[in-house]
Image (tube, rainbow, N blue to C red):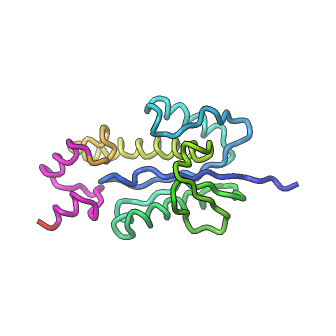
Amino acid sequence: MTIKFLAGVDEVGRGCLAGPVMSAAIILNNKIDKKILVDSKTISHKKRCKLANYIIHNSYSIGIGISTNVEIDQLNIHNATLLSMERAILNLCIKPNLIYVDGLYKPETSIKAKCFIKGDSRFPEISAASIVAKVLRDNEMLYLNEKTIVYSFNKNKGYPTKDHKMALEKFGPSIYHRKTFNPVYQMSLS
C-alpha cells in the first residue's frame, strides 16, 4: 500500500510595500482537528499564533519559501510569489503526491498541483499553510521594525497604510522596501 500525501500551499505579503513574500507548504497529519483550520485573515493575531503552534506540532512536514524584496523587484511580484511557493514545496521533507495551491497560478513543480480560488477558506491544508505563513511573515516584519522603526512595520506589516506612506514621504524608502511598487517607485523618479 502506498501512502498518499496532500500538501497545502499559500503565500502572504503580495500587496506589501516592504519585506518578503513568504509561502508555506504543509502536509497535515491524520490526527489534526481540521475543523479549526480557517483562513488566516479571519482570525486574530493571538489565535493565529496558537493555531500555528498547533499546526507545527501536528504536521508530517512543513516547508517555508521566501522571495526577498530584491527578488520581487527583479522578477515581479507574480513570479517571486511562485518562486517562494516552489521553494516551500522543495523544503518539505516528505514529497507529496498532490499539492493544493491557493489562487489562480501554481508554481513549477514535477508534482501534480491544483489551484483553488479562495482555497484558504475551502481546504484545511491550505488554511494551515496560510496561518503558518502569516505568523512567520508577521514575525519577520516585527524583526524588520527593529531595524527601521520609523515605518511602523510592527503595526502595518509593510502594507500601504496612511502612516506608512507618510513615513515614506518623510524618510524615503528603506533597503527593505520594494523599489518597483508605488509609491516607492514614484519616489525614485523624482
Residue 138, by quadrant, is top left
Q: Is residue 56 above or below residue 76?
A: above
- Horizontal and vertical percent for residue 48? 49, 34
Question: In the image as oriented, which residue stretches furthest toward the front?
Answer: 117
Any magenta on residue 184? yes
Choose between 160 and 51: the one closer to the eye. 160
Residue 52 occupies quadrant: top right
Quadrant the N terminus occupies:
bottom right
Q: Nearer the viewer, residue 57 or 74?
A: 74
Query: Residue at (25%, 47%) from the top-left corner?
Result: 148
Residue 129 screen position, x and y as percent: 56, 46
Q: Residue at x 54, y 51 (%)?
A: 24
Q: In the rendered image of this protein, does residue 14 appear above or below residue 132?
A: below
Q: Residue at position x 66%, y 42% from top? A: 59
* Magenta segment: 161-188
The furthest residue to the right: 1
Q: Is residue 167 left or right of residue 181?
A: left
Q: Quadrant of the C terminus?
A: bottom left
Tally of numbered discs: 0
Question: Is residue 187 one of those drawn in magenta?
Answer: yes
Q: Taking 17 as reference, is 98 left or right?
A: right
Q: Left or right? Give the position of 189 relative to 79.
A: left
Drawn side of residue 84 relative to residue 158, left or right: right
Residue 173 position within the rendered picture, expressed as x and y whole percent measured from the top left: 21, 56
Q: Point out residue 121 in the picture as x, y percentages from the top left corner.
A: 55, 42
Which residue shows up at 60% across the image and 32% down it?
A: 36
